[in-house]
Amino acid sequence: MKRILLCAAAAMFSSPAWSQSPAAQPPATEAQPDEEFVADVTGAENSVFSVAVPVFVTPQIAETAAGNTQALGQRMAEVIVTDLRNSRRFQPVGPSGLTPPSYGQVQAPAYSYWQGSGADNLIQGYVQANANGTLTVGCYLFDVASQSQVARQGFVVQPAEWRRAAHRCADTIYRRLSGDTGFFDTRVVYVAESGPPGRRRKQLAIMDYDGAGHRFLTQGQWTVLTPRFAPDQRTITFVSYENGRPRVYILDVATNQVRPLVEGPNQTFAPRYSPDSRSVVFSMAVNGNTDVYRVPVAGGQPQRLTNAPGIDTGGSFSPDGRRIVFESDRGGTQQIYVMNADGSDQRRISFGGGGHATPEWSPRGDLIAFTQTGSFRVGVMRPDGSGTRLLTRDAGEGPTWAPNGRAIMYQRGLGRGQVWYVDVASGESRRVPTPLEGSDPSWSALRPN
């Protein structure tokens, strides 16, 4: 298939305003290779946190471009509950069935009531309309047993960005209770597909991690494949068949302008960014041989990193930028290799049954995600190739990591795909709703403030 890029190559050659206010709050007067392994989640990392999330209240009901502040408070609480539940590390209750606090209780909870709810933690907040058309959102975390405030976060946002405020609140709660970063205020770029086999319409699309805020970046005028978000989220790289051959392009997210990554007649594909967003590793076919190259995002002379018979493709940097994982059939089957960022010390790390493809290094540096060819199941292994574990049961491919390395998004289904993500520790998965069929997802880093 096209997304298992080695196979494809073999066939081919046989932004919105956002500001943060400090302490936004109500007035004080108101109130080995085939070894099976278990992910390293011990101590606090293995905890499940119970939280109560009542409706976010408003000091005064006011109409905004996104609805009135009372309705927004309800919707924000619902988004926070969904985010925390999706992480598999929280047991949230609410907002339905919980008594909303008064505005004066946002910073001074009625602890006697919440102690009876059975939740160890309480999230409360408010939504306030400002004279300049913005919203102020306050988000507070309390420990019910100790009756103390644990964290607070304030945001000033445009009404259209209310979901971002909810996601950022959930990220704050996740970080404070788990000690890890969240992944809720993130985006996903993917290929939206429609139409019959042989005449598929493939458009670049972007959405929030949960499927909200969906929009198309291209209109299907040419075939697009394997989009990848830059870590700084300023650009997206992808492969296009605009001129009848695969070629890597760079899209500027702010302007929607598109340009080739490298000039010349050679076919290029399988792009991925370096952790600093300054360079891209990609595959290029020259004189019948396909190797991994590296080039600055701004352009320049590509540096050849591999030089072996067969097809080398699918490079992905380690989070420190010192190593690259890639796939190659130089040994006769499709397998995963690791090398230094300058191309030195190339060595194979996958030795299990079947082929291995589409490797991507975890942002935590502890695991590499891959697709097992044949069964087309998504799995993970350690960077030395040990401790392989398959995470999915149904056919899928093309894993991409959440920024905290706790979940993987992937394409489920071959030919007509859907976007799903799977929790690495538990193996639990859920579908991300998209208006069309989806393939080739790429998960962004946390969005900048």
Image (spheres, helix red, strand yellow):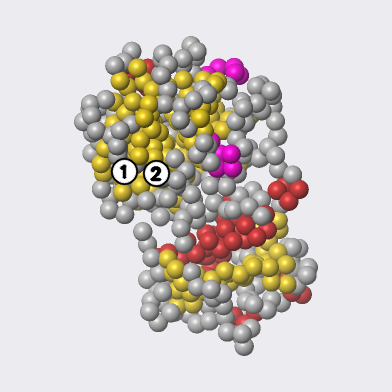
Instruction: Say if 156 sits above or below 425 in the image.
Output: below
Determine the residue positioned at 38% across, 79% down. Answer: 132
Neighbours of disc 2 within 10 Å: few (<14), some (14-19), many (20+): some
Q: Which residue is mark 1?
A: 298
Determine the residue positioned at 39% across, 40% down. Answer: 279
Whether pointer 2 and pointer 1 mark residues with C-beta atoms closer than 8 Å, the reply is yes
Instruction: Say if 337 sits above or below 404 in the image.
Output: above
Helix, strand or loop at disc 1?
loop
Marks 2 and 1, the one that precedes in the sequence: 2
Relative depth, front residue between 314 and 224:
314
For the question of whether residue 96 can be seen, the reply is no
Type of secondary structure dominating the magenta stretch: loop
Identity of the amino acid at label 1?
Ala
Residue 99 rendering spot, x and y as whole percentages = 65, 72
Residue 376 rendering spot, x and y as whole percentages = 51, 25
The quadrant of the rendering that contains the N terminus is: top left
Determine the residue positioned at 21% across, 31% down. Answer: 243
Helix, strand or loop at disc 2?
loop
Identity of the amino acid at label 2?
Arg
Q: Which residue is mark 2?
A: 278
In the rendered view, does 181 fall on the left or right side of 43? left
What is the CA distance from the residue labelled 2 to the residue labelled 1?
8 Å
Residue 227 rendering spot, x and y as whole percentages = 38, 39
Determine the residue positioned at 42% across, 50% down. Answer: 232
Residue 310 sits in which quadrant? Answer: top left
Relative depth, front residue between 402 and 266:
266
For the question of whether residue 54 can be seen, the reply is yes
Q: What range of the chain is rendered magenta?
A: 351-365
Residue 313 rendering spot, x and y as whole percentages = 42, 25
